[in-house]
Image (cartoon, rainbow, N blue to C red):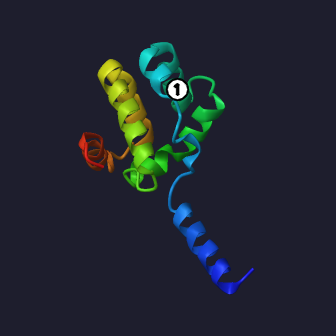
Amino acid sequence: MKTFDIIMLSIVSLVIADFYSPRYDDFDIQPLLENDRILLGYVKCFLDEGPCTPEAKDFKKVIPEALQTTCGKCTLKQKELIRTVIRAIIQDHPESWEQLIDKFDKEKMYRDAFNKFLADKNE
């Protein structure tokens, strides 16, 4: 491999490493939005109150950092998906949302920034 190719591959790897895996960029959120049982199953997983699907386990791992960085490593598609799901939780299950933010932001350090992120429709 040429030196230039190695350098380019390294740069691409660094850029990709700054984002979460695009593995779930095409995750179908419609079942979550249309079925409270499924949505609340994810919530229970995140709260350590129920079993987790493999996807929920993956999502749960990034929640703390995503909250702390206001989804700083999320792709645009991931931001859109996260906003949509969280807005559904807030609208349909506000008590569950309160439990989630209490668990992942006990000190209330990130809520204002994350609420601005949720309200943003342009990014």
Position in image of residue 73 (x %, y %): 46, 55
Give the x, y percent position of residue 47: 51, 30
Residue sitting at 63 percent across and 28 percent down? 53
3 and 48: which is toward the camera:
3
* Residue type at numbered disc 1: Tyr
Would residue 94 be found to the left or right of residue 36 on screen?
Answer: left
Placement of 23 over or under 72, stated as above or below: above
Assign the N terminus to one quadrant of the image.
bottom right
Please give the name of the residue rendered at 52% of the width and 37% of the height, measured from the top-left corner: 26
Residue 78 percent coordinates (x, y): 45, 44
93 or 105, which lies in front? 93
Quarter-of-image position of residue 13: bottom right
| Picture residue at 30% right of the left edge, 49% below the top | 123
Callout 1: 10 Å neighbours few (<14), some, many (20+)?
Answer: many
Left or right of 120 on screen, residue 70: right
Please name the residue shown 44% across and 37% down the image: 103
Residue furthest bottom in the image? 3
For the residue pair 34 and 117, the one nearer the viewer reads as 34
Which secondary structure lies at badge 1? Answer: helix
Q: In the rendered view, would you say 66 is above or below 8?
A: above
Residue behind mark 1: 42
Please state the horizontal and vertical placement of residue 64, each as a whole percent of the image.
47, 47
Question: Total of numbered circles in the picture?
Answer: 1
